[in-house]
Each structure stands twice: as C-alpha cells, then as structure tokens.
Image (tube, helix red, strand yellow):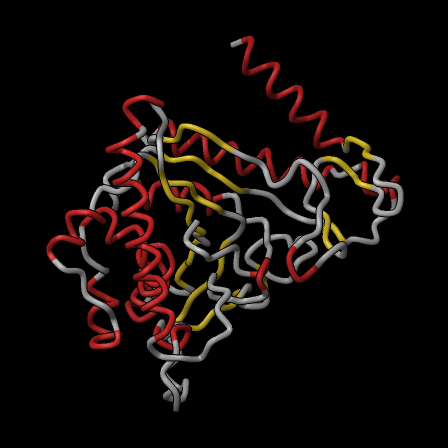
Amino acid sequence: DDGSHAPGRCSKPYGNCSEGNSGTEPYIVAHNILLSHASAVQKYREEYQGVQGGRIGIVLDFTWYQPLTRGKADNYAAQRARDFNIGWFLHPITYGEYPRTLQEIVDERLPKFTKEEVKMVKGSIDFVGINHYTSNYVYYDANRPKPEVLAYNMDWNASFTYGKNGVPIGPRAHSSWLYNVPSGIYNVIMYVKERYGNPSMIVSENGMDDPGNVTLVDGLYDNHRIDYYRTYLSNLKNAVDDGANVKGYFAWSLLDNFEWRLGYTSRFGIVYVDHKTLNRYPKMSAYWFKQLCEKTIKH
C-alpha cells in the first residue's frame, strides 16, 4: 500500500492522508516508500518467488478526476490531479521517473532517483491494485489565490467540486465525498491500461456506505448498494471487454466495520453488524453477490 486511501475515508479531498503542510516532506516520504517497496520486491524476487511462485504488487487509490468543462484549462487541471494522485507512484514504477507534471511543478523539492534506484524501482510490480470509489469534477480556478506556503495539495493547482450547474455528479452515499459514478471505474481502469502499459490489475476496493445509525430492517434492504455494484461491475466488464488486464475484484466490504475517522457512523458492508451484540445479518446485496457468483461459476 502506498499509504494513501480513498479521499473521504481519511477526510481529505486529495486522496492523501498527510496532515503535514510541508512543501517537501510528502515527496520525501513517498520517495522512500517507493524505494522500500522496490527493495522488498527485489529481495522477494531473488530469494523467494522462484520457490513460492507468488506475485507481488502495490495498491493505489485512484479517484477519477473528470474535467468540469471541455476547456483546455480544466483538462490540464484534471490531468495534474491524476498525475499527483496515481502517477506519483505508478509513473516511477512503470517508467523510472516521476510524471513530467511533478518534475516541473515540484522542481527541486522533488527527490531524484539514482541510476541504480531507477533500475530497482522500474518494473517493481507483478500487479497493481486499484482502490476506486467515486469521481470528482476538477477545474482550474484562475482567481484562486497563490498559496503563501508550499504544500502537496496546493501543488495540484486544481479545484474540486461534486456538481455542475446545480446537478450532482451522481447520487450521493452517506459519506460526503462518495457519489455513485459508475463510468469512473471504466475510466480509471482504461487510464491505467493506456498510460501504464496495461499491467495486471486487481480492483482491490470498491463500495459505498450507509449511515451508521440505519436500523437493521432498513439496513438489510440495501437496493441502492446493489445498484452501485451492478453498475460499477458492468462498467468494469466493459473495460475488460476493451482489453484491460483485470484479474480480480474485491468489494468493500464484507462486514460493517470501524471505518477510519467515521468509526461506527458509516456502514460499507454487505453484511449488517449489530455493534452492540456483534451479530451479523446478510443484506440483500450479500444475496445479490451470491447469485452473481453462482451465475458466473456456471458460465
């Protein structure tokens, strides 16, 4: 894991949970994470993979950043968001260097890879896991004041919104950041396919939440969650049909759990958990998944 998580699950709109406001620290931390990851992969491949036959990869969060308008400035802003989000890690792993966007904007604050480090980092995955939940609109705000302090989230030079002309980007789940935008999963998978050489991919997290105080009766009849999974999986299948090398999918999550800062006030599970007794009750979405799996196995 690269240390980042779904944006709202750490209450950050930029997919990065760092509380620091340093203009340099996040890049140093990420750089060292990449080097540690690559070193571990190298050791595994040299000493264990031949015997164990396992595969080793990295899991990255990727919210889809959709330009608010067709204008060039908004398209550039959306691309910066993608570069600072997933490109920050996947670009070095694929090409041995940071995205050109980061190199130009972050400049001397961005650490450099030595020739030996490039060899180690480049190609240091057998697969990439993609955590995807939702999509945002992104736009360039010409009136946005120039930041007084350099910081990671300011370097994006992009503004975010969940609606356009008063219309939300999609139906909202319980979390303020999570909207049902099925096309987003197609876009993120195809983006990785086309920009990063179509690596072996696993959708490692995908789901939506209800309020923590939803009653058992209301919680079990989660047709909205079924709709979320059905539309997202349909778009994922479209990506596979269009050549994306997707090998697996994980719904988030099996059980209602302790959800980051939201604690027990958010329920992502397909199984309802009574937080007082810890009794578990499959929701309609659990039975829907059961039928989907049975149908898939038959075919």
Dividing the picture into quadrants, the one containing residue 68 is: bottom left
Q: Residue furthest left?
A: 115
For this view, does 221 lie left or right of residue 232? right
Give residue 168's position: percent from left, percent from top: 59, 60
Residue 197 is at least partly visible in this image: yes
Kindly identify the residue that appears in the image at 50 percent across and 65 percent down. Answer: 17
Q: How many marks?
A: 0
For this view, does 12 lie left or right of residue 28? right
Give residue 24's position: percent from left, percent from top: 33, 76
For this view, does 104 lie left or right of residue 9? left
Kindly identify the residue that appears in the image at 40 percent across and 86 percent down. Answer: 143
Judging depth in this view, the residue of 84 and 236 nearest the camera is 84
Kindly identify the residue that appears in the image at 49 percent across and 55 percent down. Answer: 135
Give residue 188's position: percent from left, percent from top: 39, 46
Above or below for 263 versus 204? below
Above or below for 197 versus 157? above
